[in-house]
Image (spheres, helix red, strand yellow):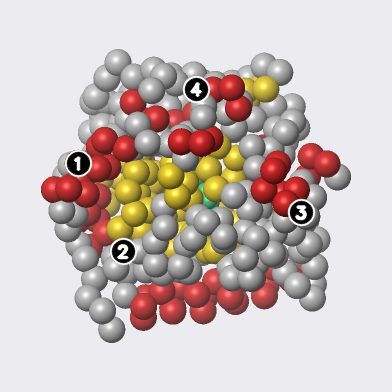
């Protein structure tokens, strides 16, 4: 078994600050990855009997979810569902890396497990996390722990270098928040794939423009996404429960003194009238997928076309 890393080099830190994202291999051991895969396989089996999304599961109907061939697109808040996900989120080596980027006072933001089934698992349209949850400062990042080697073919995460230093982008269509940017606001040609091996992590800044293509390979792509923030980055939507807020502290101390930085913001309002339980459902409102060409080439029908 290979050794795992718990420190970024100065070069990796500089690249994160310059581009707004990096890929780091060998952060989790293959033993840890195997445990995560086993538990996840069980949840995929559990989702087989479902015919609609639930509190916990988001299903991929476009990829052909059925009882015989379950296609689970997302497990919501996995760290609350099984200790193996919680252990990954609290992994000391990972928190050491995060501390290098966010400082000593670290709070959990959220977790989710996104999965792309072989042969059509859903794309994620281009967006910034900042578009969903702007805060008083942007010391917020997301880690993506991959259970599978992540390549272009199975829909790896991609980023636009330097976009985290750009203006706040609107994620609206016809005046409503749909969780995806418009084509005219960015150049997809500039996209850089984050290729990492199973057990590696992607790290992206909250303002980095990112997305991922559909999975056109015969392998899965399972990515445990875990958001972390500096304790003084307060959500502009406010904090209603101090106990819950402090309960999510992972390192250092909570504070009731937000750090106010001159960060550009577009609030995620007005909400779209169609109810949505996940980014996938919300982004289905996008008139033309950013990945229309890739979907066409792979013969995958988009939700928008159905
Ligand atoms: O799963 C992916 O490829 C990207 C996920 C993402 O950016 C999100 O869910 O906000």
Q: Which residue is drawn at 46% across and 73% down?
A: 36
How packed mark 3 is, by other alpha carbons closer than 10 Å (few <14, some 14-19, many 20 or more), is some
Mark 3 CB within 8 Å of ligand 1: no
- Residue position for label 1: 14
Please say if 85 is above or below 257.
Answer: below
For residue 300, which numbered disc appears in the image?
3
Do the numbered discs 1 and 4 sit on residues whose CB atoms are within 8 Å?
no
The N terminus sits in image quarter: bottom left
Residue 206 place in picture, x, y as percent? 39, 36
Q: Residue at x 60, y 76 (%)?
A: 42
How packed mark 4 is, by other alpha carbons closer than 10 Å (few <14, some 14-19, many 20 or more), is many
Mark 4 CB within 8 Å of ligand 1: no
- Report the Cα–Cα distance between label 3 and label 1: 39 Å
Quadrant of the rendered image containing residue 86: bottom left
Left or right: where 229 falls relative to 223:
left
Among numbered discs 3 and 2, the one appearing first in the sequence: 2
Left or right: where 150 falls relative to 202:
right
Quadrant of the rendered image containing residue 102: top left
Q: Please, what secondary structure does the residue beneath circle 4 have?
A: loop
Among numbered discs 1 and 4, the one appearing first in the sequence: 1
- Report the Cα–Cα distance between label 3 and label 4: 28 Å
* 222 or 91: nearer the viewer: 222
Among numbered discs 2 and 1, the one appearing first in the sequence: 1
Residue found at the very far right of the displayed protein? 306
Please say if 84 is above or below 153.
Answer: below
């Amino acid at each position: 078994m290979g050794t795992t890393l718990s420190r970024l080099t100065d070069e990796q830190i500089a690249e994160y600050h310059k581009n707004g994202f990096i890929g780091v291999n060998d952060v989790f051991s293959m033993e840890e990855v195997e445990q995560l895969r086993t538990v996840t396989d069980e949840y995929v089996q559990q989702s087989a009997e479902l015919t609609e999304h639930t509190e916990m599961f988001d299903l991929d109907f476009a990829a052909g979810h059925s009882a015989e061939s379950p296609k689970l697109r997302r497990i919501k808040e996995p760290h609350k569902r099984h200790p193996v996900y919680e252990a990954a989120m609290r992994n000391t080596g990972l928190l050491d890396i995060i501390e290098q980027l966010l400082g000593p006072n670290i709070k959990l933001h959220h977790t989710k497990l996104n999965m792309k089934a072989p042969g059509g698992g859903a794309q994620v349209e281009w967006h910034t996390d900042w578009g969903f949850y702007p805060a008083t400062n942007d010391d917020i990042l997301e880690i993506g722990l991959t259970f599978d080697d992540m390549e272009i073919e199975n829909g790896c995460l991609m980023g636009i270098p330097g976009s985290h230093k750009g203006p706040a982008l609107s994620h609206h269509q016809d005046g409503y928040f749909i969780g995806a940017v418009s084509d005219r606001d960015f150049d997809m040609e500039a996209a850089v794939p984050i290729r990492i091996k199973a057990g590696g992590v992607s790290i992206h800044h909250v303002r980095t423009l990112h997305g991922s293509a559909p999975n056109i390979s015969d392998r899965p792509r399972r990515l445990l996404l875990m958001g972390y923030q500096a304790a003084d980055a307060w959500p502009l939507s406010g904090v209603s429960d101090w106990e819950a807020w402090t309960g999510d502290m992972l390192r250092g101390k909570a504070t009731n003194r937000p750090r106010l930085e001159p960060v550009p913001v577009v609030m995620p309002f007005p909400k779209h009238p169609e109810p949505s339980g996940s980014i996938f459902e919300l982004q289905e409102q996008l008139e033309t997928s950013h990945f229309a060409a890739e979907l066409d080439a792979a013969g995958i029908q988009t939700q928008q076309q159905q």
